[in-house]
Each structure stands twice: as structure tokens, then as C-alpha cells.
């Protein structure tokens, strides 16, 4: 995949709390990228900068080859966006809102809209101001998905959804990228959703992307190394101890949380540790918690 084929290319981005100087990242067709980070890490700020809702202090972003603040109409129609706080017009009914959204797009999948409205039970005849938070969120999602954008950007889209609706949204995301021609950038604190659907991960820490790669690669690189007492070591553990980010010690054992676990460290431990030990693999949420403490 050449850079020119990418939906989005960003380099040296700086805006507000986000300082990604010296970093480049892309979104390519067929990817589902999960964006994770602690509150205040700059996830919404980063999305706003990538889509042109706020200006960059420095750096460069190209969306389908165009700066995000100067995208032609035909490029805008290839993007769908759902903000963390919806921007629906509360004085309209759901039906009127979808009709207004349709005016901005040359393509509109009526069958998709009807299916989602029925399956998600969105009360289109009701005024938006009278809808529940979850119903408003579903309506915003339908409006963003109806024109079948090539790039769908979702900022905490499931925060107001019940588990059934969340699962249905995940199924739709999987269907969106199944043909390999469309992509989704999903920012969420619900790590189980990220694990179900994301192929790649952006980890934002203190305003910088500390990881940009395959989801499984990150999960495999963060482990808990459980060591029993008395600890017996026949050789140096210099490589392993250099990757320890936190330790827990009790009378019976100690646990090292290691970031950057790989075959070289595994071999060092196997050669040096003669007392019983166990390497525990972590899910995304546990891995995130361990490196964020």
C-alpha cells in the first residue's frame, strides 16, 4: 500500500494538548483503527485536528490528498463523523434530521437507513429534543453511515448505548470494512469493543502516539511476569529488568509488569531464572491499565 493510496496521512501534528512532532501515521483502506488513551490524553483534540474542526499549530494532515480545512465537497462526502456530543438539531424530528442530512450527499442508501432505524428502534416521528441520549446517538450514527463513507470516524459512539445496541454497532462496523475498501477510526473507552473489531491501535499517552501498529502486537508486548519466592537467578536479567514498568511484591511472590516483551526477553528469562515463574498474557484493558498507572 503506497502512501498515496491512504485515506489519511498525518505528519508532525501539533495542536493543543497533542504534540506528535517527529511522528507519522496513516489510515489505509480496510483498516479499523482503535484510538485509546486516558481522559485528557487528547483523543478528541486529535480527531478534530485530523478532520479540520480545529487548526494545527504545526505539521501536516492530508485527507484523501487534501488538507482537512480545504476539502472539496466530493471529498467531504467520503467522510462520516459522529462526535462524542452529537450536533443534531433538537427542534427537528428524527425523520426531518435524516432528510436534512441526505441533502448534503449524492449517495444515500435508503435500504440501510430503513434497516438500521427498524433494528435500532429509532423513533423517527419524535422530536430530537424529546429523545433519550441513546436514541440520539443511534440517530447520529445512522446519519453518518447512510451515505456509506469511505472513512468513518467515531468518537465514543457507544458511550450511551446499551449492550445490545453496542453489539449491533460492532456488527455494522465489521460489515463496513468487509470489502477492504472502507475504513473506520474508532475512539472508545470500551476496550471490549475495540478488541472485537479493531485490527490496528493508536495509543495516545500525554499527547503523543506511543504505539501505532497491530492490536495483537501491543497486547503481546505487555505481560505480567510472576516470580515465586525465593527467587533463584543463575545469570543476569539486564534486558528484562530494563523493560519493567511496575512491580508488585508480596511474601510469596513478586510480579513484574513488562512493556516490550519479546522472544529475546523470553529466552533470557528461560536461561536465567531457575525458580518457578509464569508469564501472563493480558487483554487490552488490563494491558492499558498496567502501563497507565
Image (cartoon, rainbow, N blue to C red):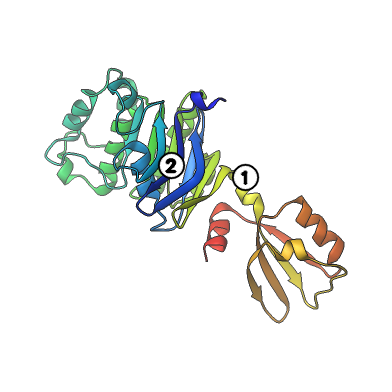
Name the element at disc 1: helix
Q: Could you say which disc has been placed on residue 216 in the image?
A: 1
User: Which mark is first along the chain, 1 or 2?
Assistant: 2
How many neighbours does mark 2 have within 10 angstroms: few (below 14), some (14-19), or many (20 or more)? Answer: many
Q: Could you say which disc has been placed on residue 186 in the image?
A: 2
Q: Residue at x 42, y 44 (%)?
A: 13
In the rendered image, the residue lying farthest to the bottom is 251
Q: In which image quadrant can residue 271 be found?
A: bottom right
Q: Residue at x 20, y 34 (%)?
A: 94
Name the element at disc 2: strand
x then y, percent, for residue 182: 46, 26
Classify 268 as above or below 198: below
Q: Nearer the viewer, residue 17 or 288?
A: 17
x then y, percent, for residue 252: 73, 78
Q: Residue at x 72, y 52 (%)?
A: 262
Q: Is 220 left or right of 82, judged from the image as shown?
A: right
Q: Nearer the viewer, residue 262 or 25?
A: 25
x then y, percent, for residue 165: 38, 42
Q: Nearer the viewer, residue 120 or 208?
A: 208
Placement of the N terminus among the 4 image quadrants: top right
Q: How many marks?
A: 2
Amino acid at each position: 500500500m503506497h502512501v498515496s493510496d491512504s485515506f489519511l496521512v498525518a505528519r508532525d501534528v501539533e495542536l493543543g494538548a497533542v504534540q506528535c512532532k517527529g511522528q507519522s501515521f496513516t489510515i489505509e483502506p480496510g483498516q479499523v483503527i482503535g484510538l485509546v488513551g486516558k481522559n485528557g490524553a487528547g483523543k478528541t483534540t486529535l480527531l478534530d485536528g485530523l478532520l479540520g474542526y480545529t487548526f494545527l499549530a504545526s505539521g501536516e494532515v492530508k485527507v484523501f490528498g487534501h488538507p482537512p480545512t480545504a476539502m472539496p465537497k466530493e471529498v467531504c462526502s467520503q467522510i462520516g463523523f459522529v462526535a462524542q456530543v452529537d450536533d443534531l438539531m433538537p427542534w427537528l424530528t428524527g425523520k426531518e434530521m435524516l432528510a436534512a442530512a441526505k441533502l448534503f450527499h449524492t449517495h444515500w442508501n435508503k435500504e440501510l437507513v430503513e434497516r438500521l432505524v427498524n433494528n435500532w428502534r429509532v423513533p423517527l416521528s419524535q422530536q430530537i429534543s424529546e429523545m433519550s441520549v441513546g436514541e440520539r446517538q443511534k440517530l447520529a450514527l445512522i446519519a453518518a453511515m447512510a451515505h456509506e463513507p469511505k472513512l468513518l470516524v467515531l468518537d465514543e459512539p457507544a458511550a450511551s448505548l446499551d449492550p445490545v445496541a453496542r453489539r449491533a454497532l460492532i456488527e455494522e462496523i465489521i460489515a463496513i470494512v468487509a470489502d477492504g475498501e472502507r475504513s473506520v477510526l474508532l475512539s472508545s473507552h470500551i476496550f471490549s469493543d475495540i478488541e472485537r473489531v479493531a485490527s490496528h491501535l493508536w495509543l495516545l499517552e500525554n499527547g503523543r502516539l506511543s504505539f501505532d501498529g497491530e492490536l495483537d502486537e501491543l497486547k503481546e508486548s505487555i505481560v505480567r511476569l510472576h516470580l515465586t519466592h525465593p527467587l533463584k537467578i543463575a545469570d543476569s536479567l539486564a534486558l528484562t529488568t530494563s523493560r519493567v514498568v511496575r512491580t508488585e511484591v508480596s511474601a510469596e511472590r513478586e510480579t513484574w509488569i513488562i512493556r516490550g516483551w519479546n522472544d529475546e526477553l523470553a529466552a533470557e528469562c528461560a536461561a536465567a531464572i531457575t525458580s518457578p515463574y509464569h508469564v501472563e498474557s493480558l487483554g487490552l484493558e488490563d494491558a492499558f491499565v498496567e502501563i497507565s498507572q
